[in-house]
Image: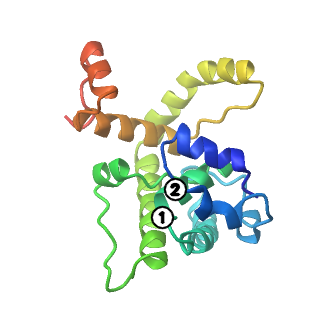
Amino acid sequence: MFHAGLLTAVNRAMRARSPRKAWAPFLEVPIPELTQLPVDVDLVESTDEEYASVRLDLERCYRLLTAAKWITDMSASKMLHLKRPRLVAISDSYVRKVLAISEPDPARHPWRVEYCTARALHVSDAVRAVGLHNADLLKCLQLAMSDTADQIATMCQAPMLLSIARIIDILVWVDAAIAAGHQTWKPLADAAGWSSVRC
């Protein structure tokens, strides 16, 4: 189930600004579609057969959540990511732009359930493809970050999982934010001599 604290995290730390009223029917209650979403399948490291199967489970979750007024794939993917961090890629506008994910065809995917579900699944497919194509490099980054993650997990007294999909999301989002002149990230990037990964 989705706990109210997850929505707070999504709206504060992840800046979703998703209304609590929209999520009320899904908070603190069992959700069969979420229960059926495997906890041990990794978006990038799964086999093609595993991914094809879990993609259907993801589709059911997105259809359920985006049927609610004011919930789009962006906030739905952030909530699902907190529940299944190894599996769910976040459908953020920066990520979609950098990965050249075109908007679904409204003729085939009318707003909102069909459209948002298709868009979220396009992001999932694209992040998986990037992860598979850059597997060795991303594995090195994951290992390099493991010591820091362990230290943070110890301080927070909770396990910390940084999946390959999340590393891709961070790299893409930060680079896109810097390119867009983000008020926080751009000055930090300039000070650090950041060179865009898209150069």
Is residue 58 visible in the rendered image? The answer is yes
Q: Three-letter amino acid code at disc 2? A: Ser
**Which amino acid, by three-letter code, is at mark 1?**
Thr
- Compared with 186, 77 (above or below) is below
Q: Is residue 70 above or below residue 198?
A: below
121 horizontally vs 55: left or right? left
Q: Residue at x 71, y 50 (%)?
A: 4
Q: Look at 51% across and 45% down and name the residue there.
A: 165
Frontmost residue, 174 versus 28 = 28
In the rendered structure, the answer to whether residue 164 lies left or right of residue 60 reads left
Residue 115 point in image, percent of width and height: 41, 74
Q: Residue 75 carries which label?
A: 2
Which of the labelled discs sits on residue 94, or is there none? none
Q: Residue at x 70, y 44 (%)?
A: 5
Rendered location of residue 36, percent (x, y): 74, 67
Direction front: furthest residue: 21
Q: Quick one: quadrant of the N terminus?
A: bottom right
Q: Name the residue under label 1.
A: 72
> In the image, residue 189 lies at what x, y percent?
29, 21
Q: Distance between the residues labelled 1 and 2?
A: 6 Å
Locate residue 163: give its quadrant. Answer: top right
Q: Do the residues labelled 1 and 2 touch (CB within 8 Å)?
A: yes
